Amino acid sequence: MTTGDLFNPTEEHRMLRDLITEFTQQEVEPQASTHDASGTMNVELMRKVGELGLLGITIPTEAGGAGMDSVGAVIVHHELSKSDPGFCLAYLAHSMLFVNNFYHCSSEQQRARYLPRVLSGEWIAGMGMTEPGAGTDVLGMSTTAVRSGDHYVLNGTKTYITNACEGHCFLVYAKVEGRVSAFIVDRDCPGFTTSQHIEKLGMRGSTMAELIFDDCRVPVANLLGEEGQGITHMMRNLELERLTLAAMSVGIADRCVDIMIRHAQERRAFGEPLVNFGQIQRYLADGYAMTEAAKSLVYHVAHHCGPDARNRIGTDAAKLFAAPVGKTVADYAMQVMGGSGYCREYPVERLWRDAKLLEIGGGTIEAHQKNLSKDLTRSRPLA
Protein backbone atom coordinates (compact mmCIF):
# COMPACT_ATOMS: atom_id res chain seq x y z
CA MET A 1 0.00 0.00 0.00
CA THR A 2 1.38 3.42 -0.95
CA THR A 3 1.43 6.15 1.67
CA GLY A 4 2.18 9.24 -0.39
CA ASP A 5 5.22 9.84 1.84
CA LEU A 6 8.39 10.76 -0.10
CA PHE A 7 10.62 9.12 2.51
CA ASN A 8 8.47 6.05 3.32
CA PRO A 9 6.40 5.52 0.16
CA THR A 10 4.96 2.17 1.31
CA GLU A 11 4.33 0.46 4.59
CA GLU A 12 7.19 -1.90 3.72
CA HIS A 13 9.56 1.05 3.51
CA ARG A 14 8.37 2.37 6.88
CA MET A 15 8.91 -1.04 8.48
CA LEU A 16 12.38 -1.22 6.94
CA ARG A 17 13.25 2.19 8.43
CA ASP A 18 11.96 1.14 11.85
CA LEU A 19 14.01 -2.06 11.66
CA ILE A 20 17.27 -0.41 10.64
CA THR A 21 16.78 2.51 13.07
CA GLU A 22 16.41 0.12 16.00
CA PHE A 23 19.34 -1.99 14.81
CA THR A 24 21.52 1.12 14.41
CA GLN A 25 20.73 2.38 17.90
CA GLN A 26 21.22 -0.99 19.58
CA GLU A 27 24.07 -2.55 17.59
CA VAL A 28 25.85 0.06 15.46
CA GLU A 29 26.10 3.08 17.73
CA PRO A 30 27.80 1.30 20.69
CA GLN A 31 30.72 0.01 18.56
CA ALA A 32 31.29 3.00 16.28
CA SER A 33 33.96 4.89 18.21
CA THR A 34 35.89 1.71 19.05
CA HIS A 35 36.26 0.62 15.43
CA ASP A 36 37.01 4.17 14.33
CA ALA A 37 39.87 4.31 16.84
CA SER A 38 41.27 0.92 15.82
CA GLY A 39 40.68 1.42 12.10
CA THR A 40 39.04 -2.00 11.81
CA MET A 41 35.87 -3.31 10.24
CA ASN A 42 33.34 -5.08 12.45
CA VAL A 43 32.89 -8.32 10.50
CA GLU A 44 30.51 -9.84 13.04
CA LEU A 45 28.28 -6.78 12.82
CA MET A 46 28.19 -7.20 9.04
CA ARG A 47 27.02 -10.78 9.53
CA LYS A 48 24.26 -9.52 11.84
CA VAL A 49 23.13 -7.26 9.00
CA GLY A 50 23.11 -10.42 6.88
CA GLU A 51 20.85 -12.10 9.43
CA LEU A 52 18.40 -9.23 8.92
CA GLY A 53 18.41 -10.04 5.20
CA LEU A 54 19.82 -6.64 4.25
CA LEU A 55 23.09 -7.58 2.52
CA GLY A 56 21.00 -8.16 -0.58
CA ILE A 57 18.67 -5.20 -0.05
CA THR A 58 18.10 -4.72 -3.82
CA ILE A 59 18.17 -8.40 -4.81
CA PRO A 60 14.85 -10.17 -5.59
CA THR A 61 13.41 -12.31 -2.81
CA GLU A 62 13.47 -15.41 -5.01
CA ALA A 63 17.27 -15.03 -5.17
CA GLY A 64 17.54 -14.67 -1.38
CA GLY A 65 17.52 -10.86 -1.18
CA ALA A 66 15.16 -8.38 0.45
CA GLY A 67 13.52 -7.40 -2.83
CA MET A 68 13.60 -3.68 -2.10
CA ASP A 69 14.03 -0.81 -4.54
CA SER A 70 16.41 2.16 -4.61
CA VAL A 71 14.37 3.94 -1.92
CA GLY A 72 14.94 0.95 0.36
CA ALA A 73 18.69 1.08 -0.30
CA VAL A 74 18.71 4.81 0.47
CA ILE A 75 16.85 4.23 3.75
CA VAL A 76 19.45 1.72 4.97
CA HIS A 77 22.43 3.96 4.11
CA HIS A 78 20.72 7.04 5.55
CA GLU A 79 19.96 5.42 8.92
CA LEU A 80 23.26 3.52 9.33
CA SER A 81 25.26 6.69 8.64
CA LYS A 82 23.64 8.54 11.53
CA SER A 83 25.79 6.37 13.81
CA ASP A 84 28.70 4.92 11.84
CA PRO A 85 29.39 6.08 8.27
CA GLY A 86 32.58 4.02 8.28
CA PHE A 87 30.70 0.78 8.83
CA CYS A 88 28.07 1.94 6.35
CA LEU A 89 30.78 2.39 3.73
CA ALA A 90 31.86 -1.23 4.26
CA TYR A 91 28.20 -2.21 3.90
CA LEU A 92 27.92 -0.19 0.68
CA ALA A 93 31.04 -1.79 -0.81
CA HIS A 94 29.64 -5.23 -0.02
CA SER A 95 25.94 -4.82 -0.84
CA MET A 96 26.02 -2.22 -3.62
CA LEU A 97 29.43 -2.45 -5.29
CA PHE A 98 29.56 -6.23 -5.21
CA VAL A 99 26.16 -7.85 -4.54
CA ASN A 100 23.92 -5.53 -6.57
CA ASN A 101 26.41 -5.27 -9.42
CA PHE A 102 27.14 -8.99 -9.41
CA TYR A 103 23.47 -10.00 -9.48
CA HIS A 104 22.66 -7.98 -12.57
CA CYS A 105 25.54 -9.32 -14.67
CA SER A 106 26.00 -12.90 -13.43
CA SER A 107 24.84 -16.29 -14.62
CA GLU A 108 22.67 -18.70 -12.62
CA GLN A 109 25.72 -20.86 -11.95
CA GLN A 110 27.68 -17.88 -10.63
CA ARG A 111 24.77 -16.79 -8.44
CA ALA A 112 24.45 -20.28 -6.99
CA ARG A 113 28.11 -20.24 -5.98
CA TYR A 114 28.38 -16.73 -4.55
CA LEU A 115 25.01 -15.34 -3.48
CA PRO A 116 24.34 -17.58 -0.44
CA ARG A 117 27.76 -16.75 1.03
CA VAL A 118 27.74 -13.01 0.36
CA LEU A 119 24.11 -12.56 1.41
CA SER A 120 24.83 -14.18 4.76
CA GLY A 121 28.08 -12.28 5.26
CA GLU A 122 30.10 -15.52 5.37
CA TRP A 123 32.15 -13.99 2.56
CA ILE A 124 32.89 -10.27 2.70
CA ALA A 125 33.05 -8.75 -0.77
CA GLY A 126 34.17 -5.60 -2.58
CA MET A 127 34.85 -4.09 -5.98
CA GLY A 128 38.12 -3.16 -7.71
CA MET A 129 38.00 -0.27 -10.16
CA THR A 130 40.36 2.55 -9.07
CA GLU A 131 44.05 2.19 -9.92
CA PRO A 132 47.20 4.11 -8.92
CA GLY A 133 47.12 5.79 -12.33
CA ALA A 134 43.37 5.83 -13.06
CA GLY A 135 40.61 7.03 -10.77
CA THR A 136 37.83 9.09 -12.33
CA ASP A 137 39.37 8.24 -15.71
CA VAL A 138 38.20 4.63 -15.60
CA LEU A 139 38.96 4.04 -19.27
CA GLY A 140 42.60 4.77 -18.45
CA MET A 141 42.87 1.62 -16.33
CA SER A 142 45.92 -0.50 -17.10
CA THR A 143 44.99 -3.82 -15.43
CA THR A 144 44.88 -6.48 -18.14
CA ALA A 145 43.39 -9.94 -18.53
CA VAL A 146 44.67 -12.40 -21.14
CA ARG A 147 42.87 -15.67 -21.98
CA SER A 148 45.05 -18.73 -21.36
CA GLY A 149 43.18 -21.99 -21.77
CA ASP A 150 40.47 -22.29 -19.13
CA HIS A 151 41.82 -19.26 -17.19
CA TYR A 152 42.38 -15.55 -17.61
CA VAL A 153 45.72 -14.19 -16.41
CA LEU A 154 45.36 -10.80 -14.71
CA ASN A 155 48.14 -8.27 -14.15
CA GLY A 156 47.83 -4.89 -12.47
CA THR A 157 46.92 -3.15 -9.24
CA LYS A 158 43.72 -1.68 -7.84
CA THR A 159 44.01 0.82 -5.01
CA TYR A 160 41.89 2.45 -2.28
CA ILE A 161 39.67 -0.64 -2.26
CA THR A 162 37.14 -0.78 0.57
CA ASN A 163 36.90 -4.19 2.31
CA ALA A 164 40.18 -5.31 0.70
CA CYS A 165 41.57 -6.49 4.04
CA GLU A 166 38.66 -8.77 4.94
CA GLY A 167 37.21 -9.55 1.54
CA HIS A 168 37.08 -13.05 0.08
CA CYS A 169 35.74 -12.09 -3.36
CA PHE A 170 35.95 -8.98 -5.50
CA LEU A 171 34.31 -7.77 -8.68
CA VAL A 172 37.32 -6.59 -10.66
CA TYR A 173 37.52 -4.63 -13.91
CA ALA A 174 40.34 -5.39 -16.35
CA LYS A 175 40.96 -4.91 -20.06
CA VAL A 176 40.79 -7.88 -22.42
CA GLU A 177 42.39 -6.81 -25.71
CA GLY A 178 41.67 -3.21 -24.76
CA ARG A 179 38.02 -3.79 -23.81
CA VAL A 180 36.96 -3.36 -20.17
CA SER A 181 35.61 -6.63 -18.79
CA ALA A 182 34.43 -7.76 -15.36
CA PHE A 183 35.65 -10.75 -13.33
CA ILE A 184 35.10 -12.27 -9.92
CA VAL A 185 38.46 -12.74 -8.23
CA ASP A 186 38.61 -14.89 -5.09
CA ARG A 187 41.27 -14.42 -2.45
CA ASP A 188 42.56 -17.93 -3.13
CA CYS A 189 43.17 -17.31 -6.86
CA PRO A 190 46.90 -17.97 -7.52
CA GLY A 191 48.80 -14.71 -8.00
CA PHE A 192 46.34 -12.55 -6.07
CA THR A 193 47.42 -10.66 -2.94
CA THR A 194 46.42 -7.56 -1.02
CA SER A 195 48.66 -4.86 0.42
CA GLN A 196 48.88 -3.74 4.02
CA HIS A 197 45.95 -1.74 5.37
CA ILE A 198 46.05 1.86 4.11
CA GLU A 199 45.48 4.27 7.01
CA LYS A 200 42.98 7.03 6.32
CA LEU A 201 41.50 10.17 7.88
CA GLY A 202 37.89 9.10 8.20
CA MET A 203 35.51 6.22 7.45
CA ARG A 204 37.85 4.21 9.65
CA GLY A 205 35.17 1.64 10.46
CA SER A 206 35.93 0.25 7.00
CA THR A 207 39.36 -0.86 5.84
CA MET A 208 41.19 -0.03 2.63
CA ALA A 209 44.08 -1.68 0.77
CA GLU A 210 45.39 -2.51 -2.69
CA LEU A 211 44.41 -5.53 -4.77
CA ILE A 212 47.52 -6.87 -6.52
CA PHE A 213 47.40 -9.19 -9.53
CA ASP A 214 50.72 -10.79 -10.48
CA ASP A 215 49.98 -13.33 -13.21
CA CYS A 216 46.79 -13.99 -11.27
CA ARG A 217 44.90 -16.99 -12.64
CA VAL A 218 41.13 -16.53 -12.68
CA PRO A 219 38.86 -19.29 -14.05
CA VAL A 220 37.04 -18.48 -17.28
CA ALA A 221 33.86 -19.33 -15.37
CA ASN A 222 34.47 -16.17 -13.31
CA LEU A 223 34.04 -13.82 -16.28
CA LEU A 224 30.87 -11.79 -15.71
CA GLY A 225 28.79 -11.59 -18.88
CA GLU A 226 30.95 -11.37 -21.98
CA GLU A 227 34.29 -9.79 -22.74
CA GLY A 228 33.97 -6.05 -23.24
CA GLN A 229 30.75 -5.64 -21.22
CA GLY A 230 32.47 -4.18 -18.16
CA ILE A 231 31.65 -0.55 -18.91
CA THR A 232 27.94 -1.36 -19.21
CA HIS A 233 27.99 -3.13 -15.83
CA MET A 234 30.00 -0.32 -14.26
CA MET A 235 27.82 2.56 -15.47
CA ARG A 236 24.59 0.87 -14.44
CA ASN A 237 25.85 0.27 -10.93
CA LEU A 238 27.49 3.68 -10.51
CA GLU A 239 24.08 5.35 -10.38
CA LEU A 240 22.97 3.37 -7.33
CA GLU A 241 26.42 3.77 -5.77
CA ARG A 242 26.24 7.56 -6.08
CA LEU A 243 22.70 7.64 -4.73
CA THR A 244 23.55 5.61 -1.64
CA LEU A 245 26.72 7.66 -1.02
CA ALA A 246 24.51 10.76 -1.15
CA ALA A 247 22.20 9.09 1.38
CA MET A 248 25.20 8.58 3.67
CA SER A 249 25.88 12.31 3.59
CA VAL A 250 22.22 12.95 4.49
CA GLY A 251 22.59 10.59 7.45
CA ILE A 252 25.67 12.46 8.69
CA ALA A 253 23.91 15.82 8.33
CA ASP A 254 20.74 14.54 10.03
CA ARG A 255 22.69 13.36 13.07
CA CYS A 256 24.71 16.57 13.27
CA VAL A 257 21.59 18.75 13.15
CA ASP A 258 20.15 16.77 16.06
CA ILE A 259 23.40 17.04 18.04
CA MET A 260 23.81 20.80 17.63
CA ILE A 261 20.14 21.54 18.43
CA ARG A 262 20.40 19.57 21.67
CA HIS A 263 23.73 21.17 22.57
CA ALA A 264 22.46 24.69 21.84
CA GLN A 265 19.54 24.10 24.19
CA GLU A 266 21.61 22.61 27.01
CA ARG A 267 24.79 24.69 26.88
CA ARG A 268 24.71 28.14 28.48
CA ALA A 269 26.92 31.19 27.96
CA PHE A 270 26.62 34.58 29.59
CA GLY A 271 23.65 33.26 31.56
CA GLU A 272 21.64 32.17 28.51
CA PRO A 273 21.25 29.02 26.39
CA LEU A 274 23.35 29.12 23.21
CA VAL A 275 20.17 28.87 21.15
CA ASN A 276 19.36 32.46 22.10
CA PHE A 277 22.37 33.82 20.21
CA GLY A 278 21.95 34.89 16.59
CA GLN A 279 25.25 33.40 15.45
CA ILE A 280 24.18 29.99 16.76
CA GLN A 281 20.69 30.35 15.31
CA ARG A 282 22.25 30.75 11.87
CA TYR A 283 24.06 27.40 12.15
CA LEU A 284 20.92 25.62 13.37
CA ALA A 285 18.60 27.11 10.75
CA ASP A 286 20.95 26.87 7.77
CA GLY A 287 22.09 23.37 8.76
CA TYR A 288 18.51 22.13 9.06
CA ALA A 289 17.41 23.72 5.77
CA MET A 290 20.40 22.30 3.89
CA THR A 291 19.82 18.84 5.33
CA GLU A 292 16.13 18.80 4.44
CA ALA A 293 16.87 20.00 0.90
CA ALA A 294 19.50 17.29 0.39
CA LYS A 295 17.22 14.65 1.89
CA SER A 296 14.32 15.59 -0.37
CA LEU A 297 16.50 15.56 -3.50
CA VAL A 298 18.08 12.20 -2.69
CA TYR A 299 14.74 10.49 -1.99
CA HIS A 300 13.11 12.11 -5.03
CA VAL A 301 15.87 10.74 -7.28
CA ALA A 302 15.61 7.33 -5.58
CA HIS A 303 12.00 7.10 -6.76
CA HIS A 304 13.25 7.44 -10.34
CA CYS A 305 16.31 5.18 -10.34
CA GLY A 306 16.69 1.44 -10.70
CA PRO A 307 18.08 -1.36 -12.88
CA ASP A 308 15.48 -0.57 -15.56
CA ALA A 309 15.36 3.20 -14.97
CA ARG A 310 18.66 4.89 -15.79
CA ASN A 311 19.05 8.31 -14.19
CA ARG A 312 22.62 9.61 -14.43
CA ILE A 313 21.53 13.24 -14.30
CA GLY A 314 19.53 12.68 -11.12
CA THR A 315 22.12 10.61 -9.29
CA ASP A 316 24.96 12.95 -10.22
CA ALA A 317 22.89 15.91 -9.04
CA ALA A 318 21.95 14.18 -5.78
CA LYS A 319 25.53 13.38 -4.84
CA LEU A 320 26.88 16.73 -6.08
CA PHE A 321 24.44 18.56 -3.81
CA ALA A 322 24.32 16.21 -0.82
CA ALA A 323 28.03 15.45 -0.35
CA PRO A 324 29.05 19.01 0.66
CA VAL A 325 25.97 19.25 2.89
CA GLY A 326 27.20 16.44 5.15
CA LYS A 327 30.59 18.09 5.50
CA THR A 328 29.19 21.59 6.01
CA VAL A 329 26.58 20.60 8.60
CA ALA A 330 29.17 18.54 10.50
CA ASP A 331 31.35 21.65 10.52
CA TYR A 332 28.42 23.73 11.82
CA ALA A 333 27.82 21.22 14.61
CA MET A 334 31.48 21.31 15.61
CA GLN A 335 31.40 25.12 15.67
CA VAL A 336 28.29 25.15 17.86
CA MET A 337 29.87 22.67 20.27
CA GLY A 338 33.19 24.53 20.36
CA GLY A 339 36.01 22.68 22.09
CA SER A 340 33.87 19.68 23.00
CA GLY A 341 32.97 19.14 19.35
CA TYR A 342 36.67 18.93 18.49
CA CYS A 343 37.26 16.16 21.05
CA ARG A 344 36.97 12.47 20.31
CA GLU A 345 34.71 12.06 23.32
CA TYR A 346 31.82 13.18 21.13
CA PRO A 347 30.73 11.79 17.72
CA VAL A 348 30.82 15.10 15.80
CA GLU A 349 34.60 14.94 15.37
CA ARG A 350 34.29 11.48 13.79
CA LEU A 351 31.35 12.45 11.59
CA TRP A 352 33.24 15.53 10.42
CA ARG A 353 36.19 13.37 9.33
CA ASP A 354 33.92 10.80 7.71
CA ALA A 355 32.00 13.37 5.68
CA LYS A 356 34.93 14.48 3.52
CA LEU A 357 35.23 11.19 1.64
CA LEU A 358 31.78 11.67 0.14
CA GLU A 359 33.11 14.55 -1.95
CA ILE A 360 35.74 12.18 -3.38
CA GLY A 361 34.60 8.55 -3.42
CA GLY A 362 32.20 7.19 -6.03
CA GLY A 363 32.94 10.16 -8.25
CA THR A 364 34.50 13.45 -7.24
CA ILE A 365 32.53 16.68 -7.04
CA GLU A 366 34.35 17.78 -10.20
CA ALA A 367 33.34 14.59 -12.04
CA HIS A 368 29.68 15.17 -11.19
CA GLN A 369 29.91 18.76 -12.45
CA LYS A 370 31.46 17.55 -15.69
CA ASN A 371 28.87 14.78 -16.16
CA LEU A 372 25.96 17.09 -15.45
CA SER A 373 27.21 19.80 -17.79
CA LYS A 374 27.59 17.29 -20.63
CA ASP A 375 24.26 15.58 -20.02
CA LEU A 376 22.29 18.80 -19.58
CA THR A 377 23.63 20.35 -22.78
CA ARG A 378 23.00 17.10 -24.63
CA SER A 379 19.39 16.98 -23.40
CA ARG A 380 18.80 20.65 -24.20
CA PRO A 381 20.51 21.30 -27.54
CA LEU A 382 20.40 24.73 -29.14
CA ALA A 383 17.83 25.08 -31.91
Image (cartoon, rainbow, N blue to C red):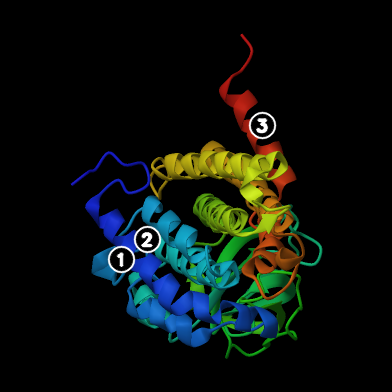
Q: Residue at x 75, y 73 (%)?
A: 200
For mark 2, give the secondary structure. Answer: loop
For mark 1, give the secondary structure. Answer: loop
Asked whether 61 or 190 is in front, the reply is 61
Separation of residues labelled 2 and 3 (CA atoms) = 29 Å
**Closer mark to the observer between disc 1 and disc 3:** 1
Q: Residue at x 60, y 46 (%)?
A: 322
Please state the horizontal and vertical placement of residue 278, each as a whole percent of the image: 69, 39
Which of the two discs, 2 and 3, labels the residue nearer the N terminus? 2
All told, the count of numbered labels is 3
Q: Residue at x 76, y 78 (%)?
A: 199
Amino acid on which disc 2 is placed: Thr
Residues at badges 2 and 1 in contact (C-beta under 8 Å)? yes
Q: Is residue 137 above or below residue 348?
A: above
Q: Residue at x 72, y 80 (%)?
A: 212
For mark 3, give the secondary structure. Answer: helix
Separation of residues labelled 2 and 1 (CA atoms) = 6 Å
Which disc is residue 58 wearing? 2
Residue 178 visible? The answer is no
Residue 118 visible? The answer is yes
Which disc is residue 66 wearing? 1
- Disc 2: CA contacts within 10 A as few (<14), some (14-19) or many (>=20): many
- Disc 3: CA contacts within 10 A as few (<14), some (14-19) or many (>=20): few
Q: Is residue 338 above or below residue 313?
A: below
Residue 155, quarter of picture: bottom right
**Closer mark to the observer between disc 2 and disc 3:** 2
* Residue for badge 3: 374
Apparent side of residue 53 relative to residue 371 in the rendered image (left or right):
left
